[in-house]
Amino acid sequence: MIDPWGSSNVDYEKIVEQFGIKPFKELLSDINDPHWLMRRGIIFGQRDYGRIVEALHKKQDFAVVSGMMPSGKMHIGHKMIVDQILWYEKNGADIYIPIADMESYSARGVDFEASKELAIKEYITNYIALGLDFKKKNIQVYLQSKNIMVNDLAYILSKKVTFNEMKAIYGFHGSTNMAHMQAPLIQVADILHPQMDELGGPKPTVVPVGPDQDPHIRLTRDIADRFKNQYRFVVPSSTYHRFITGLTGGKMSSSQPKTAIFLSDTPEEAEKKVKTAKTGGRESLKEQKEKGGDPSNCVIYEMLLYHLIESDSALEEIMENCKNGTIMCGECKTQSAELMKEFFVKFSSRRDKALKEAEKVLDSAQSC
Ligand code: SF4
């Protein structure tokens, strides 16, 4: 069982094998100008992504649903989601961004006002600073608790879901509170509501997630199928991305500040943090020159791979130089820290301007 609310140390291959997720690379050659997260295998798995590839080719309507749960500060790993949304938006998708304040309340105990505040100051601000333009008509952001269509749909859909099913998927038990049990059904409605007639009717929909969210995807796909006669739902597709490793080598987590570079960090803080990251270097310089480093086990290399270097050939060169012992970790760290600082210098100034806009975004969303 994968626990979407737990902390996970993920074995990606096992997930692909056990839960029937298909490798993403099978479809890569069919995608025109794929995002680097796709090219580099960071997005490693998919369900029914062929439908999205077809919609991209035929320039048909399709939707992307990517929720945010306001429960802590955004770190650099969360940027990956925004990068994907931006790619889809550029490629013609309608974007739906539910703010999961109901889930945050039921699963984390965050009250609704605090969720809204966090969503504005942290999430929406960062999304804008990363390049998302909420003024565009094809981008919808909303608080779950304020979206009547989503709540009504969740209620209707829950008619064909039993407690035993929820127990089998999520491990719910007799003392699980009812709000927590409802939260996944709200998410199901988040994912399916872009297919309601009021929003253009049935269409392929993709949900980019980390593998820990797969229980929600499986539940949504099953429910879409159960209601296909009533709503003509197209069963949603999904993609799965790897998690970025934390600075100390374990999971990057907002609740453990030593593991994370936060998007609200100053350029100097971000630079300093990169310099503390665990590397794949050897015990001594002599050994590293002889045997080379291990980029596959290096947080610095991951930062370059996920975020800091756009050119695949430049990245390959760093990997080769690392493996053959031409470049040492000290120099590599310094260069990477500099790149991170450059990113944060630009990003932080955009972030300052984005806050004002973020406040308006959610206010206008309340009227939908
Ligand atoms: Fe990582 Fe760079 Fe050291 Fe290689 S040289 S292990 S990529 S820090």
Image (cartoon, rainbow, N blue to C red):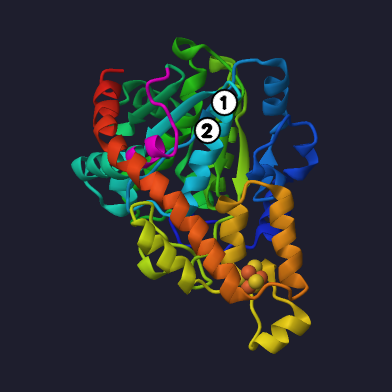
Mark 2: give few (<14), some (14-19) or many (20+) Cα within 10 Å. some
The residue type indicated by label 2 comes to: Leu
| Residue 213, percent from left and from top | 52, 48
Count the numbered circles shown.
Answer: 2
Q: Measuring 74% from the left and 31% from the top, which residue is drawn there?
A: 31
Q: Eyeballing the image, is 191 above or below 38? A: above
Q: Measuring 53% from the left and 72% from the top, which residue is drawn there?
A: 249
| Residue 152, percent from left and from top | 36, 23
Q: Measuring 33% from the left and 39% from the top, which residue is drawn there?
A: 125
Q: State the image quarter where residue 268 is shown.
A: bottom left
Q: Is residue 144 left or right of residue 210?
A: left
| Residue 159, percent from left and from top | 44, 29
Q: Is residue 317 left or right of residue 254?
A: right
Q: Is residue 279 visible?
A: no
Secondary structure at numbered mark 2? helix
Front position in the image: 145 or 299: 299
**Which residue is disc 1 drawn over?**
90
| Residue 168, percent from left and from top | 53, 51
Residue contact between numbered discs 1 and 2, judged by CB atoms under 8 Å: yes
Residues in magenta? 125-136
Secondary structure at numbered mark 1? helix
Front position in the image: 342 or 141: 342
Q: State the image quarter where residue 155 is shown.
A: top left
- In 3D space, how far apart are the residues under numbered discs 1 and 2 (Cα atoms)? 6 Å
Query: Which quadrant: the C terminus?
Result: top left
Q: Quadrant of ligand 1?
A: bottom right
Q: Is residue 151 left or right of residue 9?
A: left
**Which residue is disc 2 drawn over?**
86
